[in-house]
Amino acid sequence: MHFSAYLGHQWRHVLSVLTQRLAPTQAVHRQRGALLIELAVVISLLVLMAGYAVSALNQRHAELRIQALALWMGNVHTAFKAYLNDHGTALGSDPHYRVAGVSQAQQPSVLELKNLGYLRSDFSLAVGHKYQVQLRVWAPSECSPSACAVYGIVWAPAVVTSHHDFAYWRLNTNAAGFIVTLQQPMTISSVLSALTNPPHPDVQPLPVGSLGFVISPDMLGLDYLQVRDRRNPDFQHHVSIAGELRVAEVTHALKGLSLANAVLSGSACTTPGLLGRNIHANTLLICTSHHVWQAMGAMSGGTFTTSASGQCYHPVLGHTPNPYTQRCTCPSGFDSVRIGVGGSTPEDTYLTYACTPVN
């Protein structure tokens, strides 16, 4: 450190020695040879120190260049992940998928990401132009079209060559950035993982000295769920589903179950086991194996009362049909069981029946 101050000090020392040694005295003439040797040594040291200072300055300049590139590409990496979160599933399953505002959906440019709002409006594009930064999306060749895991890569080709620069890149990307070295040109390597170079037949090989970031499916999984994902989505707001919702195990509701539409007992239904709200009573109906809406429980088939003559009528209660059939009968799949007899004479006898499921 402080090379300029040190050099200045050495030059002042040389001038001081010259002033003293070249004084018009007899001693100066006798020591001229020693002065020349001392001067040569000092100048040699100054040249060496100057060379070291220039080398250190160049190295620091390279470090600042890599630091700036890591910061810039880190922003692009984040924007590209957001792009894949929005379009990754479609890009992985449909190679012809198009994104509005992007000329090639599989190879968006930094400018296109900025125009789509994935980058700030004041984000500078100069670094990308200087280092020819490129972006690419691909899906593994062996995946099925309905379940493709999508990958993305952001890289700057042939930026550095020295081991120091590679190490400084990893330091400034918190080990998330990858490198392509001369020793392993067929590998896109990071601290935690490695990909073959090129990672896909449709992706061009990355030249030695390339720096960048890989976006793998597990990174995208942090932002959205994929088909057959095993994690709990833990939704924090309302969820609307246009079609059917199928649950493999038990459905739990903390507050209740709301059935908006009501159904008619005894009418036809389509899905056995389905629950419905009774349109004529404050009860639940179930779709039986016979595809008929019936009430739930032991007395689920309803009740009715008939007169001795078989009329569905009672002098006090009035009309007494089964609420589920609207007649003095039981629904399909139920048997009538007499549960009450009223009246004082055979002529005014009234019978009450309950409908129980057929065993």
Image (cartoon, rainbow, N blue to C red):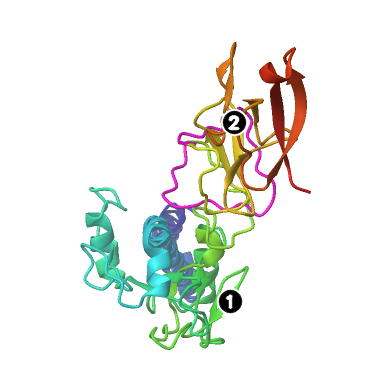
The residue tagged 1 is: 194
* Label 2 neighbour load within 10 Å: few <14, some 14-19, many 20+: many
Find residue 120 and name its label.
none
Image quarter of residue 350: top right
Camera-near label (1 vs 2) is: 2
Q: Nearer the viewer, residue 88 or 353?
A: 353
Asked if residue 48 is among those painted magenta in the image, a careful observer would answer no
Give coordinates of residue 285: x percent, y percent.
60, 38
27 relative to 138, above or below? above
231 relative to 217, above or below? above
Residue plotted at (39% across, 79% down): 158
In the displayed structure, does residue 227 sit left or right of residue 159? right
- The answer to whether mark 1 and mark 2 are in CB contact below 8 A is no
156 relative to 311, above or below? below
Q: Nearer the viewer, residue 142 or 7?
A: 142
Q: How many marks?
A: 2
Q: Which of pointers 1 and 2 lies earlier in the amino acid sequence? A: 1
> Alpha carbon of mark 1 to alpha carbon of mark 2: how far?
73 Å
Find residue 322 and name its label.
2
Which element carries disc 1, helix, strand or loop?
A: strand
From which residue to which does the magenta span run? Answer: 238-262
Give coordinates of residue 208: x percent, y percent.
45, 84
Give coordinates of residue 259: x percent, y percent.
51, 34
Say what amino acid the circle numbered 2 marks: Asn
Say what amino acid the circle numbered 1 marks: Ala
Residue plotted at (45% across, 36% down): 261
Image quarter of residue 324: top right
Residue plotted at (49% across, 54% down): 224
> In the rendered image, is residue 59 in sight?
yes
Q: Nearer the viewer, residue 49 or 160?
A: 160
